[in-house]
Image (cartoon, rainbow, N blue to C red):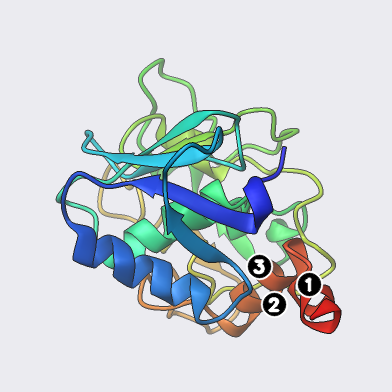
Amino acid sequence: MSWLLMKETFVVADRKTEVQEAFKMISDSSCIRFVSHSTEFNYLKFLDGSGCASYVGCQGGEQKLYFPNICTVGNLCHEIMHALGLHHEHTREDRDQYVTIEWEHILKGRHGKKVHFKKKSGSDSFIFLLQGKEKNFSIKKGNTLNLPYDLKSIMHYGEWFFSKDGKRTLSPKTSERDIGQREHLSKLDIQRLNKLYHCDERKQER
Protein backbone atom coordinates (compact mmCIF):
# COMPACT_ATOMS: atom_id res chain seq x y z
CA MET A 1 0.00 0.00 0.00
CA SER A 2 1.36 3.41 -0.94
CA TRP A 3 1.17 6.72 0.84
CA LEU A 4 -1.27 9.21 -0.62
CA LEU A 5 0.41 11.24 -3.40
CA MET A 6 3.79 10.33 -1.90
CA LYS A 7 3.10 12.78 0.90
CA GLU A 8 3.24 11.86 4.56
CA THR A 9 0.42 13.32 6.61
CA PHE A 10 1.06 13.77 10.28
CA VAL A 11 -0.30 14.75 13.66
CA VAL A 12 2.08 16.12 16.27
CA ALA A 13 1.13 16.89 19.84
CA ASP A 14 4.44 18.50 20.78
CA ARG A 15 8.14 18.55 19.82
CA LYS A 16 7.15 20.03 16.48
CA THR A 17 10.57 21.57 15.90
CA GLU A 18 12.29 18.19 16.12
CA VAL A 19 9.71 16.57 13.89
CA GLN A 20 10.13 19.31 11.30
CA GLU A 21 13.92 18.85 11.42
CA ALA A 22 13.51 15.15 10.68
CA PHE A 23 11.08 15.92 7.86
CA LYS A 24 13.58 18.39 6.41
CA MET A 25 16.37 15.80 6.42
CA ILE A 26 14.23 13.64 4.16
CA SER A 27 12.55 16.32 2.02
CA ASP A 28 15.84 18.07 1.23
CA SER A 29 17.13 14.87 -0.34
CA SER A 30 14.03 13.46 -2.06
CA CYS A 31 10.72 14.21 -3.77
CA ILE A 32 8.83 13.40 -0.56
CA ARG A 33 6.94 16.26 1.04
CA PHE A 34 5.19 16.24 4.40
CA VAL A 35 1.82 17.93 4.92
CA SER A 36 -0.43 18.38 7.96
CA HIS A 37 -3.24 15.86 8.25
CA SER A 38 -6.75 16.98 7.36
CA THR A 39 -9.09 14.37 5.85
CA GLU A 40 -6.64 11.89 4.33
CA PHE A 41 -7.25 8.23 5.12
CA ASN A 42 -3.57 7.31 5.41
CA TYR A 43 -1.53 9.36 7.86
CA LEU A 44 1.19 9.16 10.50
CA LYS A 45 0.40 9.98 14.11
CA PHE A 46 3.37 10.76 16.36
CA LEU A 47 2.99 9.59 19.96
CA ASP A 48 4.98 9.17 23.14
CA GLY A 49 5.96 5.62 24.06
CA SER A 50 8.51 3.38 25.75
CA GLY A 51 10.84 3.51 22.76
CA CYS A 52 11.33 4.83 19.24
CA ALA A 53 9.19 2.65 17.00
CA SER A 54 7.49 2.48 13.63
CA TYR A 55 5.80 0.09 11.25
CA VAL A 56 7.61 -0.53 7.99
CA GLY A 57 5.67 0.93 5.07
CA CYS A 58 2.13 2.25 4.86
CA GLN A 59 -0.26 0.03 6.83
CA GLY A 60 -3.48 1.87 5.94
CA GLY A 61 -5.43 4.42 7.98
CA GLU A 62 -4.03 6.00 11.11
CA GLN A 63 -0.48 4.77 11.58
CA LYS A 64 1.29 5.30 14.89
CA LEU A 65 4.94 6.25 15.15
CA TYR A 66 6.38 6.40 18.66
CA PHE A 67 8.73 9.25 19.51
CA PRO A 68 9.43 9.59 23.27
CA ASN A 69 11.91 12.05 24.77
CA ILE A 70 14.77 9.55 24.59
CA CYS A 71 14.63 9.72 20.79
CA THR A 72 16.82 12.23 18.98
CA VAL A 73 16.02 13.89 15.66
CA GLY A 74 18.24 11.27 14.02
CA ASN A 75 16.31 8.48 15.73
CA LEU A 76 13.08 10.02 14.50
CA CYS A 77 14.41 10.25 10.94
CA HIS A 78 15.31 6.55 11.19
CA GLU A 79 11.75 5.70 12.24
CA ILE A 80 10.19 7.86 9.51
CA MET A 81 12.36 6.01 7.01
CA HIS A 82 10.80 2.79 8.31
CA ALA A 83 7.34 4.28 7.76
CA LEU A 84 8.41 5.16 4.22
CA GLY A 85 9.15 1.48 3.63
CA LEU A 86 12.85 1.02 4.44
CA HIS A 87 14.07 -1.88 6.57
CA HIS A 88 17.22 -1.93 8.67
CA GLU A 89 20.30 -2.06 6.45
CA HIS A 90 21.82 -4.90 8.46
CA THR A 91 18.78 -7.12 7.69
CA ARG A 92 19.68 -7.36 4.00
CA GLU A 93 20.13 -10.88 2.64
CA ASP A 94 23.78 -10.14 1.84
CA ARG A 95 24.62 -8.70 5.25
CA ASP A 96 26.77 -11.67 6.28
CA GLN A 97 29.31 -10.58 3.67
CA TYR A 98 29.79 -7.29 5.53
CA VAL A 99 28.99 -7.83 9.21
CA THR A 100 29.04 -10.59 11.80
CA ILE A 101 26.14 -10.85 14.24
CA GLU A 102 27.41 -11.68 17.74
CA TRP A 103 24.36 -13.61 18.94
CA GLU A 104 25.69 -14.46 22.39
CA HIS A 105 25.85 -10.79 23.39
CA ILE A 106 22.35 -9.75 22.28
CA LEU A 107 19.62 -8.92 24.76
CA LYS A 108 16.73 -11.33 24.48
CA GLY A 109 13.24 -10.15 23.64
CA ARG A 110 10.25 -10.37 25.92
CA HIS A 111 9.60 -14.00 24.99
CA GLY A 112 13.20 -15.09 25.35
CA LYS A 113 13.69 -15.60 21.62
CA LYS A 114 16.48 -14.13 19.56
CA VAL A 115 14.63 -13.00 16.47
CA HIS A 116 16.00 -9.53 15.72
CA PHE A 117 19.17 -10.86 14.13
CA LYS A 118 17.72 -13.88 12.32
CA LYS A 119 17.35 -14.42 8.60
CA LYS A 120 13.67 -14.55 7.74
CA SER A 121 11.05 -13.46 5.23
CA GLY A 122 10.25 -9.99 6.53
CA SER A 123 6.65 -10.68 7.54
CA ASP A 124 7.08 -8.78 10.80
CA SER A 125 6.61 -5.11 10.06
CA PHE A 126 6.75 -3.41 13.47
CA ILE A 127 10.15 -2.14 14.59
CA PHE A 128 10.67 -1.53 18.32
CA LEU A 129 13.87 0.05 19.55
CA LEU A 130 13.56 -1.07 23.16
CA GLN A 131 11.64 -4.36 22.99
CA GLY A 132 12.09 -7.59 21.05
CA LYS A 133 15.76 -6.82 20.49
CA GLU A 134 16.80 -9.77 18.33
CA LYS A 135 13.92 -9.19 15.91
CA ASN A 136 15.57 -6.05 14.59
CA PHE A 137 18.45 -8.13 13.26
CA SER A 138 16.29 -10.56 11.24
CA ILE A 139 17.11 -10.65 7.54
CA LYS A 140 14.38 -9.29 5.27
CA LYS A 141 14.19 -10.45 1.67
CA GLY A 142 14.15 -8.16 -1.33
CA ASN A 143 14.97 -4.81 0.26
CA THR A 144 18.28 -4.02 -1.47
CA LEU A 145 16.85 -2.06 -4.46
CA ASN A 146 19.99 -3.26 -6.28
CA LEU A 147 22.15 -0.81 -4.33
CA PRO A 148 25.40 -1.62 -2.47
CA TYR A 149 25.46 -2.49 1.21
CA ASP A 150 25.87 0.65 3.31
CA LEU A 151 27.63 0.54 6.67
CA LYS A 152 27.12 4.30 6.99
CA SER A 153 23.34 4.13 6.55
CA ILE A 154 21.09 5.83 9.09
CA MET A 155 19.19 2.53 8.94
CA HIS A 156 22.20 0.47 10.11
CA TYR A 157 22.69 -0.55 13.74
CA GLY A 158 25.86 0.25 15.62
CA GLU A 159 28.29 -2.26 17.05
CA TRP A 160 26.91 -2.24 20.59
CA PHE A 161 23.17 -1.90 19.95
CA PHE A 162 21.14 -4.08 22.35
CA SER A 163 24.20 -5.53 24.06
CA LYS A 164 23.48 -7.44 27.27
CA ASP A 165 27.07 -7.38 28.51
CA GLY A 166 28.77 -4.35 26.97
CA LYS A 167 30.27 -6.41 24.15
CA ARG A 168 29.69 -6.00 20.44
CA THR A 169 26.47 -7.37 18.99
CA LEU A 170 27.46 -6.55 15.43
CA SER A 171 30.98 -6.42 13.97
CA PRO A 172 31.88 -5.05 10.53
CA LYS A 173 34.17 -7.25 8.44
CA THR A 174 36.12 -4.22 7.25
CA SER A 175 38.04 -1.54 9.15
CA GLU A 176 34.93 0.68 9.09
CA ARG A 177 33.95 1.67 12.61
CA ASP A 178 31.64 4.64 12.05
CA ILE A 179 28.45 2.60 11.86
CA GLY A 180 25.12 3.13 13.57
CA GLN A 181 25.19 6.90 12.99
CA ARG A 182 21.98 8.88 13.46
CA GLU A 183 23.21 12.26 12.22
CA HIS A 184 22.27 12.34 8.54
CA LEU A 185 21.13 10.33 5.55
CA SER A 186 24.05 8.69 3.80
CA LYS A 187 24.51 9.01 0.04
CA LEU A 188 23.12 5.51 -0.40
CA ASP A 189 20.18 6.25 1.94
CA ILE A 190 19.27 9.10 -0.39
CA GLN A 191 19.65 6.94 -3.47
CA ARG A 192 17.56 4.19 -1.91
CA LEU A 193 14.75 6.54 -0.89
CA ASN A 194 14.65 8.24 -4.28
CA LYS A 195 14.65 4.91 -6.07
CA LEU A 196 11.87 3.53 -3.87
CA TYR A 197 9.66 6.57 -4.56
CA HIS A 198 10.69 6.98 -8.23
CA CYS A 199 11.81 10.54 -7.59
CA ASP A 200 13.91 10.78 -10.76
CA GLU A 201 10.91 9.80 -12.87
CA ARG A 202 8.77 12.39 -11.13
CA LYS A 203 11.30 15.12 -11.91
CA GLN A 204 11.14 14.20 -15.59
CA GLU A 205 7.33 14.38 -15.56
CA ARG A 206 7.35 18.01 -14.40
Label 3: how many residues lie within 10 Å, few (<14), some (14-19) or many (20+)?
many
Residue 144 position, x and y percent, is: 77, 60
Mark 3 lies on residue: 193
Instruction: Kindly identify the amino acid type of the residue bearing the numbered disc 3.
Output: Leu
Q: Is 46 above or below relative to 148?
A: above
Instruction: Pick the quarter of the image with the C terminus.
Output: bottom right
Q: What is the residue that sits farthest to the front in this orientation?
A: 39
Instruction: Tell me if 86 is positioned left or right of 108 in this view.
Output: right
- Return the residue at label 1: 147
Q: Point out residue 26 in the picture as x, y percentages from the top left corner.
A: 49, 71
Q: Is residue 94 above or below residue 174?
A: above
In the rendered view, would you say 148 is above or below 112? below
Q: Secondary structure at mark 2?
A: helix
Do labels 1 and 2 touch, CB within 8 Å? yes
* Rendered image quadrant of residue 22: bottom left
Say which residue label 2 marks.
Answer: 191
